[in-house]
Image (cartoon, rainbow, N blue to C red):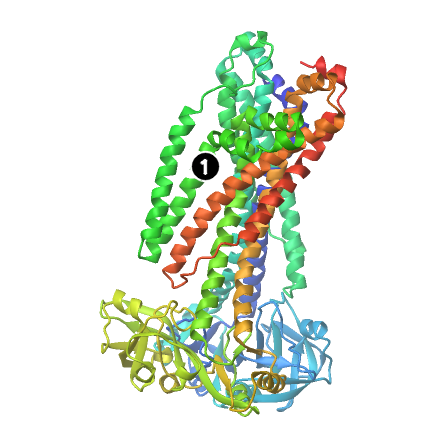
Amino acid sequence: MLKATLRSFLAHKGRLLLSALAVVLSVAFVAGSLIFSDTVTRTFDRLFASTSADVTVTPKEDLDSQIPSGAIATVPTSLVARIDKIDGVALARPDVAVENITVVDSENESVGPTTGAPTIAGDWYVTERSPVELTSGHAPRGPDEALLDADTADKKHVGIGDTLTVIAQPGSFKVKVVGIATFRTTNPGAALVFLDPAVARTKLLGKADAATSIQVDAAKGVSDEQLKQRIAAAIGSGTYELETADEQAETAAAQLGGFLDVIKYVMLGFAGIAVLVGVFLIVNTFSMLIAQRTRELGLLRALGADRRQVRRSVLLEATLLGLVGSTLGLAAGIGLAIGLIELMGLLGMNLKTAEMVIGWPTPVAAYVVGVGVTFVAAYLPARRAAGVSPMAALADAEIAGVGRPLRVRAVVGLIVGALGAAALVGCVTATETGSAASLLGLGVVLTLIATVIAGPLLVRPVIRVLGGFFPAVFGSIGRMSQRNALRNPRRTGATAAALMVGLALVGGMSVASASMSKSFDDQIDKTLGADFVVQNANFLPFPQEITEKVQDTAGAGLVVRQRFTPVAVRLPDGKRVETTAAGYESQLDEVARITYAEGDTAAALADGNIAMDAGFAKDHDVRLGSTIPVEFPAGQKTELKVAALTDQDAAEGFGTQGGLFFGLGTIEKYVPGGQDSALYVNAASGTSADTLRANLDKTLDPYPQVQVRDLADYKKLIHDQIAVLLYLVYALLGLAIVIAVLGVVNTLALSVVERTREIGLLRAIGLARRQLRRMIRLESVVIAVFGAVLGLALGLVWGVCVQQVLALQGMKALAIPWTTLVAVVVGSAVVGIVAALLPALRASRMNVLAAIAHE
């Protein structure tokens, strides 16, 4: 049996190749993501561990926010003298490093990275642990000199002697580049600017007696943990955060982990799609091979092989296929990881392929995925093979499964589909986002499974409709192609299911993204009343200097400032909620249209008051007039009275939880040193919007980090952000289509082999080669369009349900992108034509007499 199995596997290696490609793709994405993330993690662990001080003292920050306030938390430099006196301290020094800056060249072009990595300005202090070393020029001396890292200098064509402008919180200042510093280890992609230490404190922080941290080195024989405990005992741990070098590395690695997780989850998403679609391909391939080998399997049974031996034989073939696919996939994964490392190099993160990490979990995961998926997918066909009767060896032909009823599928599909539909109905009727999202996920999984199970039941009615015009347009060729697709509903359903999965995903996400875009458009039209909004490109705050320049711009009338701060509120129901609150100036009504359930803007922005979303207030037992404790950064606390409840379709403050906002004076009182996040600008009387736009553009030319946006620009910004998600979905769709095309090619190729004698007879009675090719192409098209119709129908249902979940977050508009959906159907027909090219060509080249004599 082992020899027979190996011979069978080698005899069908060409037919199994396409199935192996699905395994290769899924394993490649799994292995590539693991290798890449392990390499980046190991590289940065070394970087952080080698550059961190033994103990770092920083301000204690209890609140975190996705939208920062712009205030820089500092420690007093007087702390250095206290720490220096502690037993076990070899050296303590103040350190300055800030990220809320922008550096521009003489042409007002930013020299910072465009990849999302920060631009960091700090003080130049050389130690053995410095991440960079001076390689040309000299160290900065005095207020007008700076160093720049070599990678930024090379990328932005900046040399020694060039003048840069640093736009910092206290104000802008010019520096001359007097030296270039080169990274000793990995360049994480950031742009680094170094200043004289005294200059860094005054120019970046606005005060000479402050630093962003204190770096402490331990004396010989004193461990980092011992030193940390001694410092904590001397200065107290309530006001300051103390971290050893290892803890500092862990914190930095955790922050980097968010970036790595995005890449990892995206690649695992591709792997998941490849696995899911590949399962259909493998099931179909083995089912057809077993159907074609009915006589061979029957002969084995007649010679004495029992059911278990036949089943083992087929599963062994699947295991061999999985091993080959996993091995090739692992190699492809290494190549993919190398490609990602090179891509990161182009983006500024200089990783070394020579230091690539391939830990033992990677090959284990690769083979578990590859072999496991193939084995599981081949199990049902293997059981079917074990059921072949010894008498089948005497039969002329037997196509397994063609004539068996689909009653079991109908019952199971109906039950699973009913459960899925119930979950989706529950999602639509739910009133809480968490339960709605959970029901949505359950409904999506169950309806997908139900559609796959019941797919063969839908083949005959749907394909009769889709191919109904074939006989009228293509005559007898069209009729035969339609009947070929109807001949084996199980096969047609499994082939179409591969395409259906991808198209269901793209259909659902297209509806969701279109609905999100329309909801935001409606919300912007409804709430934004200003002529222009001045904002940072990535919503980060900007210096007061920019606000003053905008206020002084010719033609600028009313300018209303917006500022954010992280807060924590203690609510009447006992819950403590950390979120972000916004602060506005009193003229907010002139630049925004806010709908209130109770109260008004004047009350909301008055001293000692706060406004919140009415739904949030209801959920936490807050009423108009309630007084709630509010915590601000740096331990500042107060109590504010709820003076207004908003009734917006989406919460104010960029959808932050609770929609909290109050007067700008409240933020300035409890979070001093913050920065504005947006300016709402109206044209002065007698000034046109176009004139003001031109004047603002001219004013802000030296500040490339901020943009002027009108209503249309604002909508485009939102659409572009949503489009990023769609591009990912389209990439997943592309992968699914590639594998689905392999599936259609495989099905048609095996079908051509299966129908060799039939094709020979058709050719013998006058069917031309061109007609034969057309028949196979039409069969492929109708299968592909069938998969597209099922997928889009399912995707539409999912998309509508996703929109209902979004409606609970205020995005109530429903939009269906009919153009996209029609384009997908047309594209599916093209996919069908492309997939049929090789099988049709092979069929048309058959020798007629040899085909008729084929067994």
What residue is at 60 percent from the left and 19 percent from the top? 292
Q: Can residue 234 be seen in this view?
A: no
> How far across and down, in percent of the image, does residue 202 sit?
53, 90
Q: Residue 629 versus residue 797: which sits nearer the camera?
A: 797
**Based on the displayed image, in which of its 4 quarters is residue 472 positioned?**
top right
> How far across and down, in percent of the image, does residue 816 sit?
49, 54
Q: Residue 507 versus residue 568: which sits nearer the camera?
A: 507
Rendered position, 236 above or below 442: below
Label 1 environment density (alpha carbons within 10 Å; few <14, some 14–19, many ≥20): many
If the image is split into quadrants, where does the N terminus sit? top right
Q: Answer left or right for 159 relative to 587.
A: right
Helix, strand or loop under label 1? helix
> How far across and down, in percent of the image, does residue 200 sit?
56, 86
**Based on the displayed image, in which of its 4 quarters is residue 737 positioned?**
top right
Q: Residue 628 versus residue 214: which sits nearer the camera?
A: 628
If the image is split into quadrants, where does the C terminus sit? top right
> How far across and down, in percent of the image, does residue 7 sit?
65, 20
Q: Which residue was labeled with disc 1?
A: 451
- The type of residue carrying mark 1 is Thr
Q: Answer left or right for 686 relative to 573.
A: right
Rendered position, 33 above or below 183: above
Q: Is residue 434 visible?
A: yes
**Based on the displayed image, in which of its 4 quarters is residue 129 positioned?**
bottom right
What residue is at 48 percent from the left and 43 percent from the top? 793
